[in-house]
Amino acid sequence: MHIPTAFASLLLLPLALCAPPSPPNYGYPPTQAITKLTQGGYKFALTIDQKQWSNLSQVMTEDIYYDSSALGAGYGGLAVGLDQVRTVLEETAPEGIYWEHLVTNLYLEKLNTPTNASSITYITVSRWDPSALHDITKTYRIYYRCDDVWLLQDGNWKLSHSIVRNTGPRVEAPYFGSISMSQE
Ligand SMILES: *[C@@H]1O[C@H](CO)[C@@H](O)[C@H](O)[C@H]1NC(C)=O
Ligand SMILES: *[C@@H]1O[C@H](CO)[C@@H](O)[C@H](O)[C@H]1NC(C)=O
């Protein structure tokens, strides 16, 4: 039976509709986006751990929304805007205090647009007050998870929105409080 060409291509149409959608093209390969976002996360930690407060605008947006109140009073809270976040960070890690944000498992969940990404990150934060190593309000460790939105601005991925949750049951005392000083 002879099938006219036009009719034959109509028969093929449903096949074309069933083809898997091609991945969105945001102008650069996803691997590059993942690398850049991971570097953004590491730079964020480096900047605050080194207390480079004047560099915060390189790693967070001016209108940052940061909610770590789930960590509990004394350990977390809500801060909105770069100035407020800076004030809280400076108060938490003044001169003489050591701290470290160990950023791991930075999972790029979704590239929402070419300049907006959602990620999930695990962080272990340790804070040490050398004059109060056995006081859990001053020397502590917290394991937490962040649900974040990052924006690409001036070539850097900057934190725009962050919701922080404890992944462990509660804040930990790195020295367990009961070990006598002579054993350390
Ligand atoms: C802070 O910014 C200055 C100037 O851009 C740069 O030299 C320095 O390495 C930055 N510090 C961090 C921790 O990124
Ligand atoms: C980034 O994308 C998320 C998810 O779509 C959205 O909720 C958020 O408002 C966006 N942020 C900006 C600044 O566009």
Image (cartoon, rainbow, N blue to C red):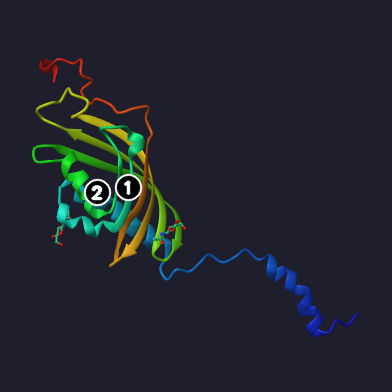
Which residue bears the numbered disc 1? Answer: 66
Q: Is mark 1 within 8 Å of ligand 2?
A: no
Residue 95 in the image: above or below residue 135: below
Label 1's element? strand
Q: For the residue marked with disc 1, what is the amino acid? A: Tyr
Left or right of 5? Residue 84 is left
Residue situated in front as seen by the camera: 7 or 112: 112
User: Which tag, 1 or 2, sits closer to the chain's start?
Assistant: 1
Specify the quadrant that holds the C terminus: top left
Which of the 4 quarters of the picture holds residue 96? top left
Q: Which image quadrant shows ligand 2?
A: bottom left
- The image shows residue 64 at horizontal and vertical percentages of 31, 54
Q: Position of residue 60 (x, y in %)?
A: 28, 56
Name the residue carrying label 2: 85
Q: Quadrant of the N terminus?
A: bottom right
Judge left or right: residue 5 versus residue 134.
Answer: right
